[in-house]
Amino acid sequence: MTTDAAARAEDDTAAAAPPLLARFDRFAWWFAAIIVLQACWLAGLMASGWYYQADFANLAAATGRPLSWAYLSHAQGGHLDVIGRVVFWVLNRVDPLNHSLTIAAR
């Protein structure tokens, strides 16, 4: 009899457990909605815009320079950004001044 009671208790708790989506509280839904809306807004602004001044400076710095430590360690906006330098160097070699590709990579 105890095994039957335990099995029924497990069935009751399994049936009472809400699905995963219902377990998210309202804060998590609002948080996710704000992130999605902000990403859409930023994508819309960037898609209809043009390069930023820093993009031109970074692409110009990559023009005609080898991928060396001197180029990679040069400050970018006052900070060390080796990955950013590599991205702009590759963009300059693959398809210079391709706005869509630059925005997607950034």
Image: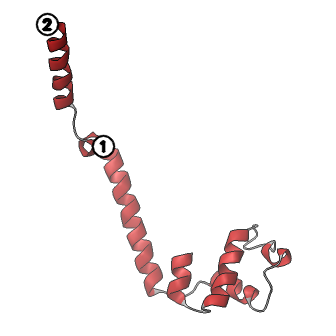
CA distance for labels 1 and 2: 37 Å
Label 1 packing within 10 angstroms: few (<14), some (14-19), many (20+): few
Q: Amino acid at mark 1?
A: Phe
Instruction: Give the image's coloring scheme.
Output: secondary structure
Q: Residue at x 56, y 83 (%)?
A: 102
Circle 1 sits in a helix, a strand or a loop, which is it?
loop
Residue toward you, 38 or 89 = 89
Q: Nearer the viewer, residue 27 or 94?
A: 94
Measuring 44% from the left and 83% from the top, which residue is drawn there? 47
From the viewer's perspective, tell me whether residue 7 is left or right of residue 89.
left
- State the quadrant of the N terminus: top left
Identify the residue position indicated by label 1 in the image. 24
Sequence-wise, which precedes: disc 1 or disc 2?
2
| Residue 93 location (% of width, % of height) | 67, 89
- Look at the image and tell me whether residue 4 can be seen: yes
Task: Residue lying at the far right in this picture: please name it.
Answer: 70
Image x and y of residue 85, in percent:
71, 76
Asked if the residue under mark 2 is in contact with the one under mark 1, i.e. CB atoms within 8 Å, the reply is no
The circle drawn on residue 1 is 2
Name the residue at 73% across, 70% down: 82
* Residue 72 picture location, percent across and down: 78, 74
Side of 63 where 37 appears, left or right: left
Amino acid type for the residue under numbered disc 2: Met
Determine the residue positioned at 66% across, 88% down.
92
Q: In this rendering, is residue 44 above or below 22?
A: below
